[in-house]
Amino acid sequence: MIKRLVEIKPSVAEVLSSVNIDSLLVDDWTQLEQICVLLEPFATQTDILQTDGMSLSSVIPAILDLQCHLQQFAAGRDLTRAMLADMAVRFAAIMDPTDPQFNPLPAAACLVDPNLATVLFTTGGGVIEYAKAFLVQEV
């Protein structure tokens, strides 16, 4: 919705001007553009993950990608910090082995996915150890 508003900005300004209503300030438009850039990867990952061809092994890489995007996003540091904190709480059950509700199944799905296993073995951290133990227990 924000993306579309930014795309039709000239038309919005023209209509508001014709009925003598003030348009958004330049700073407001700039903030909307920054929010659009900030949220675009979330829309992309949502579209990708909701397709029929995706598997559970795609969830953790998507979360890691979004966290990386938030950490690298230059504008709106307060907002990105709040979003990162919210993601940590929201996805603790699959990303934090110390969480009481932790479920190693998504990490195990990553380990058995040949496209992801090599990367996760080298960068996975504690979650991967729990995934390995889960797979050994299940086998």
Image: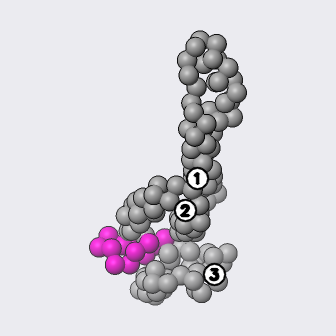
Whether pointer 1 and pointer 2 mark residues with C-beta atoms closer than 8 Å, the reply is yes
Q: Quadrant of residue 74?
A: bottom right
Residue 7, position as x, y percentages in the image? 69, 34
User: 24 or 12: nearer the eye?
Assistant: 24
- In the image: residue 65, left or right of residue 90: right
Residue 39, position as x, y percentages in the image? 57, 50
Mark 2 residue type: Leu
100 in magenta? yes
Q: Residues within 10 Å of mark 2 (few under 14, many from 20)?
A: many
Q: Which residue is rendered at x = 54% and y = 62% of the image?
A: 70
Mark 1 residue type: Leu
Q: Earlier in the sequence, mark 2 or mark 3?
A: 2
Q: Which residue is mark 2?
A: 70
Mark 3 residue type: Val
Whether pointer 2 and pointer 3 mark residues with C-beta atoms closer than 8 Å, the reply is no
Q: Which residue is rendered at x = 46% and y = 80% of the image?
A: 127
34 in magenta? no
- In the image: residue 135, left or right of residue 116: left
Judge whether residue 50 can be spotted in this image. no
Q: Which residues are drawn in magenta?
A: 95-106
